Amino acid sequence: MGMTGIFCFRRSVFLLLGLAGTSMATPPQVIRADEKFFGSGTETYAVLRTVTDNKGSYYRSQSTTKLIERKKTTGEMVRETVMLDREEITDAEYDGPGKAPVEIVIHAKDEKESLGVLLERWPGQGTRTDPAELKRFKVHASGIRYDGRLELMKGNPYIANLKAEGLRFSDWGLVDGLELRDSIFLKAIRADNEGDSDAIWMTVSPEITAQVRAFRKILPVYLSLGSSADRAEALELARKASATLKEAKFASQETEIWRTEQGGSPLYRVVMTGSDYVIKNGKVEELGKLPDIHVVPISSEGFLEWISTEAK
């Protein structure tokens, strides 16, 4: 049973106990889970996940922290280790001066691996996502989209598990982000009306991260150098156009490919990456005079997927 499923089960049990006559003075049991990003390695990343439980009492609380390793490609959990399971028990009978004594009970504590070894395994700390950039990521019922058209979390096991528990992912909100060499990480939080809450750090795969970075640099208008319904043909067209531009020592020499749709079928458009410079500096006519170069201005509004000209 997932953490959110545990929340629902525990809440139902508590309500049944309340109907049986539990004292109204007893606080509701509240379970809160939070995650701190620990680090990222070549294939996996790690978080410190802490679950706190007030036990439905003013006098007892338990906190369990686990180190959880997940795959960067899918977010699937590889392993988890309990780092510290700690309980605080306040003397409910104490009526003397000052604060009541508190007993600390350690139920579990991991001492097998040093901090240095863990940091060696996941050395990457990443760069925090700018708040304005974070707003470009939008949660919807089954995942996250970037700029309203790039699907980020399709097939992610974590989201699939939440949906299997009957939850809507749209109940979550993004609160933080990190970016490393080839991956983007996003932190989502969900809270219910009873006080329970959960938080998760999710990964955006390296392939999708490359797409996000391409969309960040997308221009409103491009100079199209041709198109094809066949991906391989578009790649060949892009390479030939790039070679022609370099041979002519044209100012903007790089090309890229964007997938669009035409009549429900894919259409791969070859465009010039420096289109804005060429247009701004009045070099469109000069570009059109190059051999085998046919240029047409097009809008990027319908661009759905970036394709590297290095793709096979």
Image (cartoon, rainbow, N blue to C red):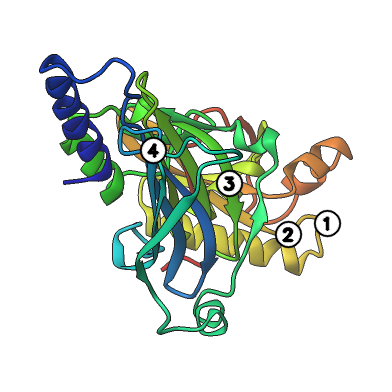
| Contact between labelled residues 2 and 1, with CB atoms less than 8 Å apart | yes
Q: Can residue 220 be seen in this view?
A: yes
Mark 2 neighbour density, 10 Å: few (under 14) some (14–19) many (20 or more): some
Front: mark 1 or 4: 4
Of residues 20 and 272, the one nearer the viewer is: 20
Say whether disc 1 or disc 4 marks the residue closer to the N-terminus: 4
Residue annotated with mark 1: 251
Residue at 40% over, 84% down: 112
Say whether disc 2 or disc 4 marks the residue closer to the N-terminus: 4
Figure quadrant of residue 238: bottom right
Mark 2 → mark 4, Cα distance in angstroms:
79 Å
Figure quadrant of residue 283: top right
Percent from the top left, x then y, of residue 152? 42, 43
Residue annotated with mark 2: 253
Of residues 194 and 174, the one nearer the viewer is: 194
Mark 3 → mark 2, Cα distance in angstroms:
34 Å
Mark 1 → mark 4, Cα distance in angstroms:
82 Å
Q: Eyeballing the image, is 64 above or below 8?
A: below
The quarter in which the C terminus is drawn is bottom left
Identify residue type, mark 2: Gln
Residue annotated with mark 3: 177
Identify residue type, mark 1: Ala
Q: What element carries label 3?
A: strand
Say whether disc 3 or disc 1 marks the residue closer to the N-terminus: 3
Mark 3 → mark 4, Cα distance in angstroms:
46 Å
Front: mark 3 or 4: 4
Residue at 49% over, 28% down: 148
Residue annotated with mark 4: 93
Q: Can residue 309 be seen in this view?
A: no
